[in-house]
Amino acid sequence: MSKDHLYDREAICPFYRGTKEKQTILCEGPFDGSYLGLTIPEQQLFDCQRKNYCNGNYRCCEIYRMVTEKYKD
């Protein structure tokens, strides 16, 4: 992944990879070597997503649940 992103040290989600401009959260993708970018246009909703999921109860995040599937046998 390029170095044009920031890493939130408060993030606890194992699939969190950073944030980019324009309120984009970067996450591990559903297959090896892939990444997802979740862009949330409203700053308040972006902050809420990061606080509640990336930095909190990540097991309830839709992206976490999707990526977890690739690790199931």
Image: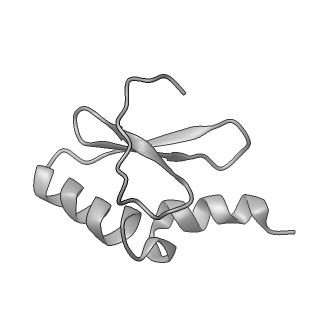
User: In the rendered view, would you say 62 is above or below 32?
Assistant: below
User: In the rendered view, would you say 73 is above or below 42?
Assistant: below
Query: Could you say where residue 12 lies in the image, as x and y percent from the top left?
Result: 46, 64
Q: Is residue 7 left or right of residue 63?
A: left
Query: Could you say where residue 18 lies in the image, as x and y percent from the top left?
Result: 41, 43
| Residue in the image at 25% along x and 32% along y | 21
User: In the rendered view, would you say 13 is above or below 57?
Assistant: above
Towards the viewer: 38 or 53 = 53
Q: Which quadrant of the figure contains the C terminus?
A: bottom right
| Residue in the image at 18% along x and 44% along y | 41
| Residue in the image at 22% along x and 54% along y | 46
Residue most extreme to the right: 73
Q: Identify the image's colour scheme: rainbow, by chain, secondary structure or one colour.
A: one colour
The part of the image, by quadrant, that contains residue 33 is top right
Query: Could you say where residue 9 lies in the image, as x and y percent from the top left?
Result: 37, 53
The part of the image, by quadrant, that contains residue 31 is top right
Q: Which quadrant of the figure contains the N terminus?
A: top right
**Number of numbered discs present?**
0
The part of the image, by quadrant, that contains residue 3 is top left
Query: Could you say where residue 51 lies in the image, as x and y percent from the top left?
Result: 27, 66
Towards the viewer: 44 or 19 = 19
User: In the rendered view, would you say 50 is above or below 35?
Assistant: below
| Residue in the image at 22% along x and 34% along y | 22
Towards the viewer: 4 or 48 = 4
